[in-house]
Amino acid sequence: MHHLYHGRRVALLTQHGKERVIAPVLEPGLGCTIEHVTGFDTDLLGTFTRETPRPGTQLEAARRKARKGMELAGTSLGVASEGSFGPDPFTGMFSWNVELLVWVDDELGSEVVAVAQGAARNEHIQSDDWEAVAAFAEQEGFPEHHLVVRNDGADGQALYKGIADWAQLKTSFDLARAQSAGGTVFVERDLRAFANPSRMQLIAQAASDLLARLQSQCPACEAPGYWIAARNPGLPCAACGQPTTSFCEEVWSCPRCQHKEVRARTDVVAAEPKDCPHCNP
């Protein structure tokens, strides 16, 4: 698919430095030019610090960013990134980061979505003790990972962002404590991409996933983005032969023409007994 986007301009609206990890993946892989777009405050679409709730879903927010970037740059191609944090999908006990990228192609009338996800650190502390806050900062990888400070609690009105050195952290702590009704300060990781190297790594992974999808061509309409849409369970157990929750086939789908194809799994022919609900109930 290199020829399809070779020499094309692709709008990327971001004010948090995401172009630094997206462009180095997509430009050489597609031959395109990622055009960093500014002139719109993306915080209006939602903030991690909760003063502006994000309307709609993660995909809808990414789509709005892509569309706004395309409008400002005057392009028919756009890419945008949106992150989210929540409980992990396995136990619900740990923080989980999902990074989503959407590629919009108005000439083809198609949209390709890529995702990378993994465990995240999203801890906080509420304390009136500077030594406790300093210990928390070290634990959270400060100053490489920036911090946010506010008075009283998670929704305190005195908000200090972009804290990237120890002197700034101490000053913000003192100011927030002075503005606190209870004398405590709330400190958490800054989850904006430029302030969070862990997020940047996942965004780069999502960009690699997007590149792979864009390089996969639909056998029916030749559009990019032909990829696995679902995995059907039922791989037989190697011990008892009963169907298991392990997948036995993949459903490939085109986001443009909706052509589908079912492909049998070829890397293994049977599931391990430990994954079988009959052998290992």
Image: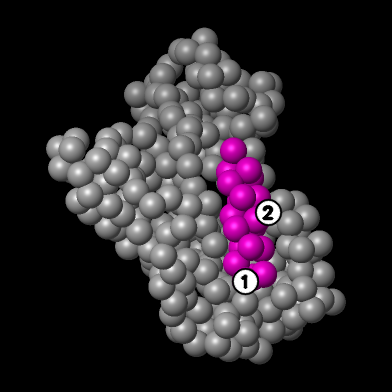
Residue ranking furthest to the right: 7
User: Type of residue at label 1?
Assistant: Ser
Query: Looking at the magenta stretch, what is its main secondary structure?
Result: helix
Query: What residue is drawn where x is 55% and y is 87%?
Result: 220
Which numbered disc covers residue 50?
none
Where, quadrant-wise, is the C terminus in this rendering?
top left
Which residue is under mark 1? 216
237 and 204: which is toward the camera: 237
Image height of 218 relative to 162, above or below: below
Would you identify the image quadrant in which residue 211 lies? bottom right
Q: Secondary structure at mark 2?
A: loop
Which residue is under mark 2? 18
Q: Is residue 232 magenta?
A: no
208 and 40: which is toward the camera: 208
Image height of 203 relative to 36, above or below: above
Query: What residue is drawn where x is 60% and y is 58%?
Result: 209
Nearer the observer: mark 1 or 2; the answer is 1
Q: Position of residue 60 (x, y in %)?
A: 46, 70
Sequence order check, earlier mark of 1 and 2: 2
Image height of 167 relative to 78, above or below: above
Q: Is residue 55 left or right of residue 102?
A: left
Q: Is residue 208 magenta?
A: yes
Q: Secondary structure at mark 1?
A: loop
Would you identify the image quadrant in which residue 77 lies? bottom right
